[in-house]
């Protein structure tokens, strides 16, 4: 009822209702298109900071104890004579993980494309609340600033790992990074979670209430289904991390013992008793595992759209894809214990989490099969967005296969906290989600900026990144199975690991080349905003509603009435009973074109 009522907002011209200043248009904008650009650019900047950190600590892992002038130039007192301090190594690992998981892959991916596409693809003038949308971005920006400021604290940034397990994170005297840097980390994350919740609530209300006439839930593009369910998962799970962060702040600053018990430090007996660090693990991973899908689902939704468009075929198994998104959302909230098999968990409880973990492989496999069958015998257009989407399918499968090993409690114990885990989650979550982000940027850049990215630079970016991503993370499986622990500053104290040192050098060289490839993307991105070829209105011949809106960026998206929807989102290469295209000479039928006489709507 409300969906139809809101869809019939009076369709007068919303483009010129007030004069905008530079500040209201580019800084405190309430227009979802501008906010999506703000999210994207902030996310890319944070991404480059995160990648730079990983390159710095990879130098230490490949050549432990070697002097690198660049380390002294960048890290100052934390790299005396060009040799990285062990405490700074831990801090870089911690902040790299935090930035990439939360600030790039959660806010950068979801914030950018949920904001850009939800109103445009469902046929809405804007988000349900433009003001809340603006607030959610600025909270994200503020949390990013606080996280970056924590890098410059005298005692060093947080260094308890991105999972910030107590007691390292709960005792200010535990290590240098447990002081003010840890406090700033917690403050930053509390602000970030507030931003995420405001954004998620906005996305949910917009999808439920502001769809245009004819845009039933069964006609939504799979991108919108992915963003919608991602927002629902965020609303359910992020408050749990907020509670963990607040309780940790209380343990640190107000003498409580939620996560601490029987602590001895430097011979001193502390007064804490009755708490449990394992309670923190439960709270953290109750967000931490849904977080994997908060990161992955938007990337998978983008991939659905890009693959269907560039295979010139209807997406295979639309209803199965929607069902798998819903199944993933539910199952993701009951699998968190597989991160805790080595925490002394009851073996029976471990077997329950093993079962639910292996169960979630089923909807994930459904998505992989559906992508492959959509590609099968399609008229494939290998542009950069399509290549990154196919790359995502590849890393999603290769990374997911090792998840079956880590999800089994008996097998996991052998490789837990080794590089095998690093390889698994970087492939299935990090690289897959980054590929989804890149695919989205290449596909919707014309919609965002009205210009085309350079395709040849896009090819260079993809192939170098794809080769180097496997070059970095594939060998990690083997050094992990050999027992090499993760997060160690150096492994030279253990003679059994000496023969693995050459593999670490190979990994680091691949990582450095991959970092350079991202500079190609950044050049292409910035140059194309100003000097790229002017984009046509619908450069990819897509069926979804966003390509019916004018290129000029106006409040309200459409100059005149909002188009009504008459068909699902994937009418590609559709023919009538005579074997002719429904629209002569055109192998796609946009959603706002009415059904012809005798034509049936596909929704398989």
Image (tube, grey):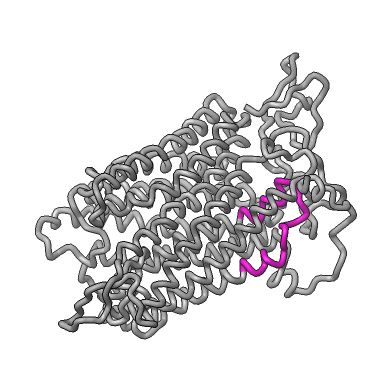
Who is closer to the viewer here, 355 or 81?
A: 355
The stretch in magenta equals 113-137
Taking the spot 21% from the left edge, 47% from the top edge, the residue there is: 481
Q: Nearer the viewer, residue 466 or 402?
A: 402
Q: In x, y percent, where is residue 241?
A: 45, 63
> Looking at the rendering, in which quadrant would you find the C terminus?
top right
Quarter residue 514 falls in: bottom left
**Which residue reaches farthest front?**
274
Tell me the quarter of the picture where residue 58 sits: bottom left
Residue 460, x across and y down, in percent: 49, 49
Question: Which residue is located at x 47 percent, y 35 percent?
Answer: 368
Front-lying residue, 581 or 344: 344
Q: Is residue 134 magenta?
A: yes
Q: Does the magenta portion include 413?
A: no
Which secondary structure class fits the magenta region best?
Answer: helix
Residue at screen point 10% across, 55% down: 496
The answer to whether one can see residue 457 in this image is: no
Is residue 17 shown to the viewer in this render?
yes
In percent of width and height, residue 436 lies at: 52, 48
Give x and y (percent) for residue 415: 23, 49
Q: Residue furthest left?
A: 495
Q: Nearer the viewer, residue 558 or 333?
A: 333
In the rendered view of the protein, which quadrant contains the N terminus?
top right
In the image, what residue occupies the spot 55% across and 30% down? Answer: 374
Q: Tell me if 424 is positioned left or right of 22 in this view.
A: left
Q: Quadrant of residue 100?
A: bottom left
């Amino acid at each position: 009822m409300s969906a139809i009522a809101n869809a019939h907002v009076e369709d007068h011209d919303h483009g010129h209702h007030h004069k905008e200043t530079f500040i209201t248009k580019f800084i405190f904008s309430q227009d979802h298109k501008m906010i999506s650009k703000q999210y994207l650019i902030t996310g890319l900047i944070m991404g480059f900071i995160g990648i730079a950190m990983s390159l710095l600590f990879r130098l230490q892992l490949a050549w432990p104890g070697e002097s690198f002038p660049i380390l002294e130039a960048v890290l100052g007192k934390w790299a005396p004579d060009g040799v990285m301090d062990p405490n700074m190594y831990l801090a870089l690992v911690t902040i790299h993980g935090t930035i990439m998981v939360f600030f790039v892959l959660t806010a950068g991916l979801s914030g950018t494309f949920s904001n850009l596409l939800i109103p445009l693809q469902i046929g809405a003038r804007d988000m349900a609340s433009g003001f809340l949308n603006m607030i959610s971005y600025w909270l994200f920006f503020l949390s990013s600033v606080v996280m970056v400021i924590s890098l410059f604290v005298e005692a060093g940034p947080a260094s308890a790992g991105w999972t910030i397990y107590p007691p390292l994170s709960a005792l200010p005297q535990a290590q240098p990074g447990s002081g003010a840097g840890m406090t700033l980390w917690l403050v930053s994350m509390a602000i970030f979670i507030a931003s995420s919740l405001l954004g998620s609530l906005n996305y949910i209300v917009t999808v439920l209430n502001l769809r245009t006439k004819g845009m039933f839930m069964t006609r939504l593009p799979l991108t919108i289904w992915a963003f919608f369910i991602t927002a629902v998962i965020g609303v359910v799970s992020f408050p749990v991390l907020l509670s963990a962060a607040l309780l940790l702040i209380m343990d640190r600053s107000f003498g409580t013992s939620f996560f601490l018990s029987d602590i001895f430090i430097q011979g001193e007996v502390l007064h804490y008793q009755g708490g449990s660090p394992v309670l923190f693990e439960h709270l953290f991973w109750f967000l931490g595992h849904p977080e994997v899908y908060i990161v992955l689902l938007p990337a998978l939704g983008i991939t659905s759209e890009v693959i269907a468009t560039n295979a010139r075929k209807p997406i295979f198994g639309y209803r199965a894809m929607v069902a798998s998104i819903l199944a993933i959302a539910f199952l993701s909230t009951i699998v968190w214990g597989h991160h805790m098999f080595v925490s002394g968990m009851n073996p029976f409880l471990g077997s329950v989490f093993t079962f639910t973990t292996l169960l979630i492989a089923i909807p994930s496999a459904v998505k992989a099969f559906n992508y492959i069958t959509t590609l099968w015998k399609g008229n494939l257009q290998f542009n950069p967005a399509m290549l990154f989407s196919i790359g995502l399918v590849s890393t999603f499968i290769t990374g997911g296969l090792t998840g079956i090993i880590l999800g089994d409690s008996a097998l996991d114990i052998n490789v837990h906290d080794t590089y095998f885990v690093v390889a698994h989650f970087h492939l299935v979550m990090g690289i897959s989600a980054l590929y989804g982000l890149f695919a989205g940027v290449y596909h919707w850049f014309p919609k965002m900026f009205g210009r085309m990215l350079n395709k040849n630079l896009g090819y260079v970016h993809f192939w170098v990144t794809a080769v180097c991503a496997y070059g970095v993370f594939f060998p990690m499986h083997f050094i992990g199975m050999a027992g090499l622990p993760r997060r160690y500053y150096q492994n030279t104290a253990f003679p059994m690991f000496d023969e693995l040192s050459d593999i670490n050098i190979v990994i680091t060289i691949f990582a450095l080349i991959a970092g350079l490839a991202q500079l190609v993307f950044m050049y292409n991105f910035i140059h194309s905003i100003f000097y790229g070829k002017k984009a046509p209105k619908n450069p990819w011949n897509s069926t979804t509603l966003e390509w019916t809106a004018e290129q000029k960026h106006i409040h309200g998206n459409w100059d005149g009435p909002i188009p009504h929807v008459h068909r699902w989102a994937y009418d590609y290469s559709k023919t009538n009973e005579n074997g002719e295209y429904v629209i002569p000479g055109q192998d796609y039928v946009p959603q706002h074109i009415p059904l012809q006489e005798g034509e049936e709507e596909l929704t398989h």
